[in-house]
Amino acid sequence: MRTFAYLSPSGEPRIGVVYENVRYDFTRIWQIFKEIRNSPRTPDYHFIQLMIETGNFSAEDLLEVIEEVKGFRGLEDLIIKGEITYDVPIQRPTKIICMARNYRKHAEEFNSEVPTSPKVFLKSTAALLPNEGAIRIPRDIGRVDHEIELAVIIGETATQVTEEEAMKHVAGYTIANDVTARSLQKEAKDKGEPWTLCKGMDTFLPIGPYVVPADAIDDPHNLNIELTVGDETRQKSNTSYMLFSIPTIISYISQYITLMPGDIICTGTPEGVGPIKSGDLVQCKIEGLGVLRNTVI
């Protein structure tokens, strides 16, 4: 079960769902479901984040809604046909928290110290970019790199949670590309300055195309992960190589920063990061989560 955000031909934000390998308009399915259940006060769902915030985002929930509508009046006229314009699947997170050097070989490829505790930094929400959007590189900023990452979407408020409790707070998973202005990052490191600018520029965090509910992924710590630029494979690994697991990351962050529904945690990138330039097609693939495609201009 996969969900995605897209725009209708008139520009209205909508939620799509992939059910039995067919794309359906879930926003309309939900409206019909409300009518069947006689629940006019229940909000319409145009945004995945609203589903998460209201506690209705799981593969089990989605399946129940779809199958009830299917049994009542069929789904044929609710199929999404032709090309669509994707939207950012999580549009208004209160924060985006990223992990630095969470794969040993990535730390080693930059001759950096392998961390003994999670290392976190923030990324600007202005960096969010949907599937098939264009990564825009400002002129004269030097080298810019790709970094494929598994992204965790928080489903329930998390404050000082234990590792044993942490996974209960996960709504789902998506793919992220932590685009980094590498030359500017090196300058910042040399001066002891923060990474805000080099990590947070507009379009520097493509995410999507799907948000897959947590209960639809058997083991997020054993997913193949791969990034290509054009026909060249640059990064190829598995999430099992993360130094710090998702429960460890969530628990650690929540001791100091309250995590809210819709918040995004990027769990770090494996080795193989490299430069991108105008004209490139960057494709990020994580097992079970689809393929995130973006051009570079």
Image: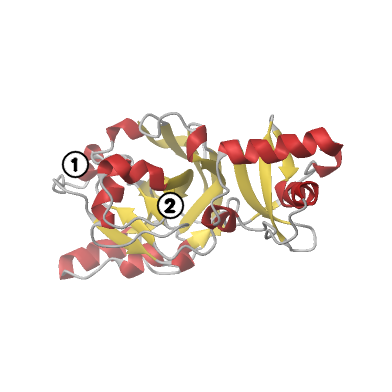
Residue ID at (53%, 53%): 52
Q: Earlier in the sequence, mark 2 or mark 1?
A: 1
Residue 103, relative to residue 99: is it above or below? above
Residue ID at (24%, 69%): 194
235 or 157: which is nearer to us?
A: 157
Task: Tell me where residue 33 appears, x and y as whole percent.
Answer: 75, 47
Q: Residues within 10 Å of mark 1 (few under 14, many from 20)?
A: few
- Amino acid type for the residue under numbered disc 2: Ile
Residue identified by numbered label 2:
154
Residue ID at (45%, 60%): 204
194 or 18: which is nearer to us?
A: 18
Residue 2, relative to residue 5: is it above or below? above
Q: Is residue 237 left or right of residue 79?
A: left
Residue identified by numbered label 1:
108
209 or 197: which is nearer to us?
A: 209
> Which secondary structure lies at badge 2?
strand
Task: Tell me where residue 38 appears, x and y as whole percent.
Answer: 78, 52
